[in-house]
Image: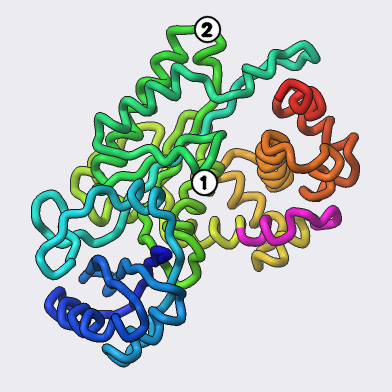
Amino acid sequence: MPLFMDCHNTPGIKIQEAEKAHLKDLAVQEKYNVKYLAYWVNEDSGKVFCLMKAPNKEAIKKTHLLANGIETCNIVEVEGGLYSAFMGKDLQDNKDLILDKNGNPDTGYRFILNLDIIAVTRLTDFIDFEQLKLPQKPLKCAEQLILKNNGTVINQLSFDRLIAVFKTPESCLLCAKEIQEKFLSHQQQYTSNEWNFRFTMGLCIGEPVTNTDDQIFQNALHQSMWYCKIAENGKIALPVEFQEISVLCRTEMDGENITIINKSDQAFIQELFDQINMHISKVNFTIDQLSKEMGLSRAQLYRKINSMSSTSPVQFVRDIRLRYALNLIKERKLTISEIAYELGFSNPSYFAKCFKEKYGISPSKIRVQL
């Protein structure tokens, strides 16, 4: 049977109350052919997450309703491998509550590190496409540091970035800082193509299922990618909540090359990317329209984006489109013209010009060399 996770918003819930509710689920699960496997409780946020096998989502809803008279907030189907990568090896008590390595209740929350690397190329038609692939030495270096800090690399989510998950905010932030220091020191010492790249990192705090997710940790992954795009070259961008949950993080976040995103800016960034993604295929979607959708004047939007990313709104939107384009070219499912129109460029020639200015090679030459 498929594997599912769900979430419940239960403000003020205590471990003992969640335990009683779980036992009630177990008492009626056979009626709908559901098998409950584990659950996580976060008393601070009032969230409970359940893991189960079931024939479908409807059977899970009926079980919860019959057992406890409650509606589940959301249910997502989960791949076994992806679940294991994010949640790790489970420690359970004898009543299915998941514990951390110290024997305390595991909150279910995880800390995501997104490392974005862009190879630096020269403007030439004779560029080797290998330069646009992720450099292997930096990748191996980052993977070693992730493992050293008890993180897990999530390889299957993307081929143009490195994503890792941690169980504590301290290990996530310290790992990011080690990667940053190592990369910056190598870039200062070496001039070989292997270390000739730009990089940013976005960190975030994520819960496995939210009210709107349709896959595990979807919202957290999106946030970490957004923060990568906001961060300046060589910097780490992360939400202020890291300071709020860890004294060590509070100290480490005072260092250089760290961008702290406050709560109002987090809301702005989410709305910004929601609007861009919603209209990304529209050729006539202008910055004036984006400003209107955001409820800001053009000047206010410029100041806000420039203060975060040191670019103009026009360049910011174009860079997002071009990064998506690079991914689509590597997937080889669409033609260059189809990609151009899919991402809102007025014509393929203009798209090719913008792409070459950013990556140093025309999109058609990438396609030939793949």
Q: Quadrant of residue 249?
A: top left
Residue 304: where, in percent of width, then height? 59, 52
Left or right: 43, with 116 as reference point: left
Quadrant that contains the C terminus: top right
Color style of the picture: rainbow
Query: At x 20% / y 59%, what residue is drawn?
Result: 106
In the image, residue 98 sits, relative to residue 151, either above or below, namely below
In the image, residue 201 sits, relative to residue 275, either above or below, namely above
Question: Which residue position holds label 1?
Answer: 225
User: Which portion, as a residue range, is magenta?
Assistant: 274-285
Query: At x 19% / y 48%, what residue is drawn?
Result: 247
Residue contact at pointers 2 and 1, CB within 8 angstroms? no
Residue 139: where, in percent of width, then height? 44, 24
> Please, what secondary structure does the residue beneath circle 2 have?
loop
Residue 48: where, in percent of width, then height? 28, 72
**Would you say residue 78 sits in the magenta stretch?**
no
In the image, residue 362 sits, relative to residue 289, either above or below, namely above
Left or right: 104, with 252 as reference point: left
**C-alpha separation, residue under disc 2 versus residue under disc 1:** 28 Å
Query: At x 37% / y 53%, what residue is drawn?
Result: 83
